[in-house]
Structure formats: structure tokens, C-alpha cells
Amino acid sequence: MKVICEICNEVIAQVEPGDVFIPMLGKMFKAPDSFHGYDPPFLPDTEWEDMRCGYCNQRPFTERDGFLTDEGYIKIEPKVVETDVIPSSVPEDFEVKTDNVQEEKTLPEYKCDVCGRVCNSKAGLGAHRRTHKK
């Protein structure tokens, strides 16, 4: 199957869909014309971010999980690796890092002395208090 650059529409590689998985690496793509002995389009360890089309020098794929071919757009499924290794249980003293977890922030509450209504802002409480002066 021929791989086509999504920018310039040139054939840049050949691929077998079963040989490509996420994350895409250069070694998954073969030369565009193996008959003439061309080199593969990417070095074996080239990552998706660093892949460039040999014609337009742009990233040939707009998505990390798919690419354009002569047979249409191919969506890649993540590779599932089966293993017989069973992970050990989690130790009791195991702590979960919460560096990226945002804590729920509580807003200050302003309570009306007359009726007990709670407002989220001082200005809101001031406007509410005027309803009691009629």
C-alpha cells in the first residue's frame, strides 16, 4: 500500500497496515519504490514528530494515529501486547501523585444577616440587602 503525503500528495513510502502501530516510527515505512532500490523515507528510529516528506519537507501526516494511502485514509489502532506476566499487588504505602490534579476551590460565601441567603460575592449580597429596605 502506498503512503501519500497529506501536504503535497506525493507517494513517499510503502507500508503493510499490520506493520504500523502507535507510536509510529520510521522503521515501519518502506521505500516508495523498492524495485528501483530507493532508500526508506525515514531513518528507523525517527518519531512521528520528526518525520518529513522528501518532496515538500513538511510533516506528511496530520494525525498521530493515521495516514493517507492510495486506498484511502488508514486509522491505526493502538498495539495490544499480550503477556503472561501478572503485576504484583500495589503496596499499602503506595501514594498517588496528585501534581496535575486540580483541587476543588471553594468560593467565599456572603450570608445575609436578615434572611440567611448566601451570595457568592460581596456585591451580590449588597444588592440582595436592598430588597429588605422596602
Image: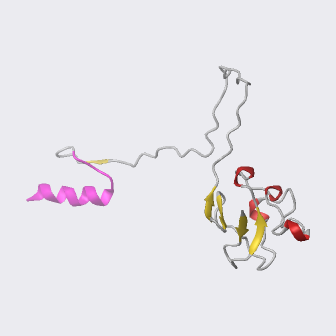
> In this orientation, which residue lies closer to the viewer: 126 or 19?
19
Q: In the displayed structure, does residue 119 sit left or right of residue 14?
A: left
User: Does 118 appear in magenta?
Assistant: yes
x then y, percent, for residue 101? 57, 44
Q: Nearer the viewer, residue 84 or 86?
A: 84
- Residue 59 place in picture, x, y as percent: 73, 71
Left or right, residue 114 beside residue 69? left
Residue 1 belongs to magenta span: no
Q: Camera-side residue: 14 or 27?
A: 14
Left or right: 122 as drawn, with respect to 62: left
Which quadrant, please, contains the N terminus?
bottom right
Q: Residue furthest left?
A: 134
> Where does the magenta region start and end?
117-134
**Residue drawn at x 68%, y 77% as measured from the top left:** 7
Q: Is residue 112 above or below residue 74?
A: above
User: How many badges with numbers are in the image?
Assistant: 0
Quarter residue 6 falls in: bottom right
User: Residue 111: image x %, image y %?
Assistant: 27, 46
53 lies above or below 27 = below
Could you tell me which residue is drawn at 82 percent across and 61 percent down? 30
